[in-house]
Amino acid sequence: MKKPLWWIKLTNFEYWSMWLFYLPTLPYGLYLALRSGSMAYFTSVNPAVPLSGMKGQPKQNILKLLDEKYLPKSLYFKHNSEFEFIKSEIEKKKIGLPFIIKPEVGERGKGVEKIKSFEELKEYLKEYLQENKADFIIQEFLKEPIELGVLYYRLPNNLKNKVKGVNNKTQSKGRLKKFKTSAITSIVQKEFLTVTGDGKKTLAQHIEDSDRARFQKKRLQKEFAQEWNVTIPTNEKIVLEPIGNHCRGTKFLDGNALITKENIAAFDEIMKPLENYYYGRFDIKVSSIEDFKQGKGIKIMEVNGVASEPAHIYDPKTPIWKAYKDIFWHMKIIQVISFQNKKDGTAFASFSEVFKLVSDEFKRTFF
């Protein structure tokens, strides 16, 4: 007997709303705020971007600073760009089909689509952009088969060869012993929503057999209307969702065992052009796990800021106590970085700015 979706949501925290899941972290967040002297202490973590990338961080502002060898081909367009102009620019840039389209300012995969034809592009422009009036990015679809989310930090003081905020004296007492100069602290390996045929069941039946796919049934029925009642041949794999986002059915797996000194060194190198950026998650693709462990073949699709989660916690095997332990650790490193930056002259945002952002998000979610 299949479990009802409401029960799966209730008993698996990976499906909880952000507001519910993060509620138990509020007391520790208040403690860190008191220690820092501001409710907006985290807004000085990445001075390079507004509010340290808490929300609404323009994607291209950071990507354009990185070495091109790490990046897919990309184009930026205003929301009112004409279709023929967009098509012409895509052809000039030699971005082939399929490609990815996404809002310049987005969150949790909203508005991200894989476009397989120019007719699909026309529909996207008509439906999504007319409603949202959002500037957008068209990005080469990377063929590398493995997608990872890599959370990385570096301490500002170590980059400047001087210690402010948490000084040498406090370090000598061991208060920062657990924090390295730079580190990869979380890797999530993304398993795309996929069904494998058995020669008997239709696509619809395979989707009904998968709890994760059942959450996406309404959307998938629309996208796979022609294949819905077709029997899937034995061992044929169909990727139902090519976008590596948890909200769209991608399974998140704990990939922390993939952290090596080689890939940490690779991210140290990647981060060199990013002045005043100290904490964030890189959404990347790689050709193989072995390449990644050696710090090779990294392609960066997106960089996120201070709101980046240690997404490995959403592995279904992760117990909830371990998830919160890891979140608290990351909250602490954010406070350490922000305090160092504050002592070096970076101001915290005002409480009113943060309150407005949070209240707007709350209204958008619940009303």
Image (tube, rainbow, N blue to C red):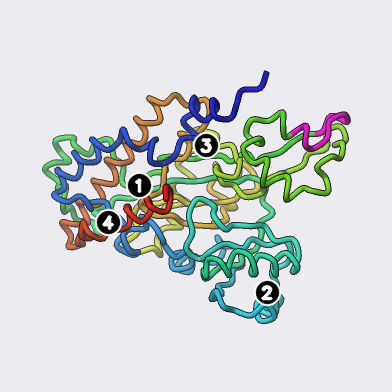
Q: Which mark is residue 25?
A: none
C-alpha span from label 3 to label 2? 36 Å
User: For the view shown, which residue lies furthest in the front direction?
Assistant: 367
What is the number of the mark on residue 354? 4
Q: CA distance from mark 3 to mark 4?
A: 35 Å
Q: How would you rate the neighbour count of disc 3 (Cα within 10 Å): few for under 14, some for 14-19, many for 20 or more?
A: some
Residue that label 2 marks? 90
Three-letter code for the amino acid on which mark 4 is drawn: Val
What mark, if any, has residue 258 been given in the picture? 3
Q: Write down the region rendered in magenta.
A: 197-206
- What amino acid is at disc 1? Ser
| For residue 177, side relative to residue 224 (left or right) | left
Contact, mark 1 vs mark 2 (Cβ under 8 Å): no
- Specify few, some or many for label 4: CA neighbours under 10 Å numbering under 14, 14-19, or 20 or more: some
Element class at badge 2: helix
- Looking at the image, residue 187 lies above or below residue 163: above
Q: Amino acid at mark 3?
A: Leu
Earlier sequence position, callout 3 versus callout 4: 3
